[in-house]
Image (tube, helix red, strand yellow):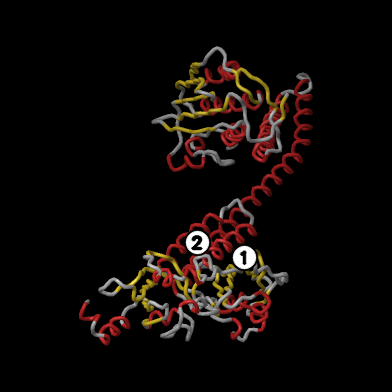
Amino acid sequence: MAQLGTSPPFFRALLEHLETAVVLCDAGGRILLFNSAMAGACQPDELRVGTELSRITRCLRNPDGSRVVRGQLPLGRALRGEHIRDVELHLGTDGRRPRTYRANGGPVFDPDGRLTGALLALHDVTERRLASRFADCELAVGEALVLEATLAEAGAGALAAVGTRLSWPYGELWLADDADETLHPVARWVAPGHQPSDPLPERLPRGTGLPGEVWATGVPCWYSDVTTSGHPSLVATAGRYGLRSAVGVPIRTPEQFIGVLALFGSCVEEPDESLLALLSGVAAHVGQFLVRRRAHDLALELTRTRDDFLALVGHELRTPLTSIVSHTELLLADEDAITGDNRTLLSSVDRNAHALRSIVTDLLDLAGLESGDLPLDLAQVDVAELVGASVTAIRPTAESNDVKIEIDAPRVLPVRGDPARLRQLVDQLLSNAVKYSPDGGDVLVCLERQGERAELTVTDAGIGIPEAERPQLFERFFRSTAGTDRGLTGTGLGLPLAKAITDRHGGTITVRHGHPGTTVVVTVPVEGPTKRPTQER
């Protein structure tokens, strides 16, 4: 180092080949020496040998974007005897995005201890900072794209996540409508101080504006300086809102083009592969969200349509079924007039009309419970008594099927709930246990309190459920092949209805599978449901 210090040509050659920006000043505060890396970081012609430090402020910024005041110039602080360690600075030419540097330096003394000047070294940490901001940006975009948010909220949240972290003050989200070959604006985000007053156009044809150009080409489009882009609309936007650069990336899936993510910067921004990769990743996140959102909305619409259809069919069927059931019961009551084959046929009509009315009632109950349109009639109910009554009611059917029911329950277990619905739930579970034990066996009914919840367990040793069909147990109209192959009747509405009643009571229902047999476990809070509006008495 001593030899280099006494050999200016070698010293200068060393400085010129350093990627680190280096500048030295003399004891009077005038620039003595700097290398090419330092010159490239500053404004053109701002850094000259002999220039006073107090005049070098145009290219320096604090991390918050404010100008560095003369008294806080790092080289000036070093000249005053301060040792500079890891001070973050932003340097850049006017109109372009500044780069981030970490400054280190200190005073320089001669062998006699006299101050001869100061030295400052600037290490470019722009890429490191960008990598951190990229990771933070991706996380923020993921948090913004929650399924519960509206499309406008999610879009604005994603644009804000990118804009605030990467210093892009303006962004737009456009979605394509293949039917009329136009783009429609969905969301806009504007940073404080860049508030545009003009509303977005209601639609953009393919090829018009930055979003339309991205749609037409199908690839990202980057304008380093929109004032020289040749696009009148971009030039006008830049002039009104103080924007200089623009980038648009397509939002797409492998099957279709979905829309465009457009962002605008306030300074000249050269194309950056890492930034473009990030924006393409963000666009992919937005595209996945839109696909999930559309699927979610479609599922909700299908559910609403299904429920509306079932309600319509149910109401339209209930009235004629009531008439059929009433008239057949009246006819069957006259044993002298209706005899022989006529009675047999009429009894079949009566039996099937009752079965169909039961299906309609279950459908309407299920639709009303799942939608929340059917309120619960809450009251204090002794669920132990309720379970005992249900067991008593089904015991004759069980005995005729060689099924023995055993019950293990406390004398009293009060729960706040809808007595009719809870009885409907227990009846359904016991009916399934008996029905799916066609070869006889034992059914164990256990009721107990577990903390703040009442737990009902119904276990049978019946034919069970094939493993491949178990995920479908709570789907409407699902019938297990284990039952249909044995000719067991059913509608496939029992377990969905049991789940709907349990859910409305704030409880849980789970199914465990034995070899053979099935165990259904239902828990409900003893204090009653709290999440849904209910009707109390």
448 or 107, which lies in front?
Answer: 107
Type of the residue with mark 2: Cys
Disc 2 crowd, CA 10 A, few/some/many (<14, 14-19, 20+): many
Q: Position of residue 373 (x, y in %)?
A: 71, 38
Q: Position of residue 534 (x, y in %)?
A: 69, 32
Task: Work out which quarter of the rendered image holds the N terminus and state it.
Answer: bottom left
Residue 160 falls left or right of residue 7? right
Q: Position of residue 465 (x, y in %)?
A: 46, 36
Do we see residue 537 in this rendering? yes
Task: Work out which quarter of the rendered image holds the C terminus and state it.
Answer: top right
Outermost residue, left side: 3
Labels 2 and 1: the sequence-earlier one = 2
Outermost residue, top side: 411
SS for tag 1? loop
Q: Position of residue 246 (x, y in %)?
A: 57, 76
Which residue is under mark 1? 191
Do we see residue 396 in this rendering? no
131 to 434, vertically: above or below: below
User: Mark 2 touching mark 1, by CB under 8 A?
Assistant: no
Foreground label between 2 and 1: 1
Residue 381 falls left or right of residue 328? left
Residue 155, image quadrant: bottom right
144 or 451, which lies in front?
Answer: 144
* Residue for point 47% across, 63% down: 133
* Residue for point 57% across, 77% down: 245
334 to 18, vertically: above or below: above
Which residue is under mark 2? 137
Type of the residue with mark 1: Ala
